[in-house]
Amino acid sequence: MEKIKKKIIVCSTCAAEYDISLVRCPYCGTAYAPAEENEYMGQLEDIREELEEHKEDGNKSLRSGLGSVVRIIILVAVVIALLLFGTMWLSGMREKSEAERQKEEFLINQGVKTQQERMTDDM
């Protein structure tokens, strides 16, 4: 069986020996820069990965929200178009009715029988 050697360093402050993977000396608390840097870089990588996950979640939420907004805008535009069309149609019908009434009034004033009067006479 092969013996696994642990890498050991000597603390620059208290001269204690400890495992190289430790960030600080377990006796005096002096930081070991290479291990501390590795730990810090690992934490940064974890943060970067979490941000990437949240970025994807945010993009999905944004697309979903925009889709809903677009659907609402289209629905509102259709409703407005229908209301405008209905208003114009009703206005046109009213104008046509008013024009017909004025025409009948003019014909009566001129002594011309209206279509309704002619139909009554034919019966």
Image (cartoon, rainbow, N blue to C red):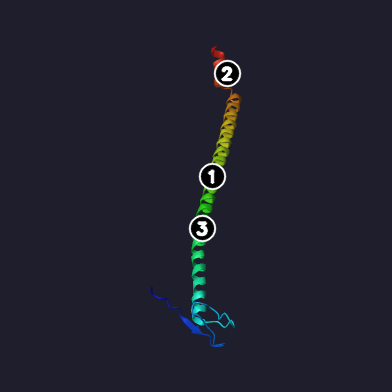
| Other-residue count near label 1 (Cα within 10 Å), few / some / many at <14 / 14–19 / ≥20 | few
Q: Could you say which quadrant of the image residue 30 lies in? A: bottom right
Choose the circle earlier in sequence order: 2 or 1: 1
Q: The C terminus lies in which quarter of the figure?
A: top right
Give the Cα separation between the discs numbered 2 and 3: 76 Å
- Mark 3, secondary structure of its residue: helix
- Residue carrying label 1: 75
- Residue carrying label 2: 117
Residue type indicated by callout 3: Asp
Judging depth in this view, the residue of 107 and 46 nearest the camera is 46
Residue type indicated by callout 1: Leu
Residue 78 in percent (x, y) is at: 53, 43
Residue 62 in percent (x, y) is at: 52, 56
Residue under the image location 54 percent in, 44 percent down: 75
Residue 57 circle label: 3
Judging depth in this view, the residue of 114 and 49 nearest the camera is 49
Q: Is residue 39 above or below residue 108?
A: below
**Decide: marks 2, 3 in contact (CB < 8 A)?**
no
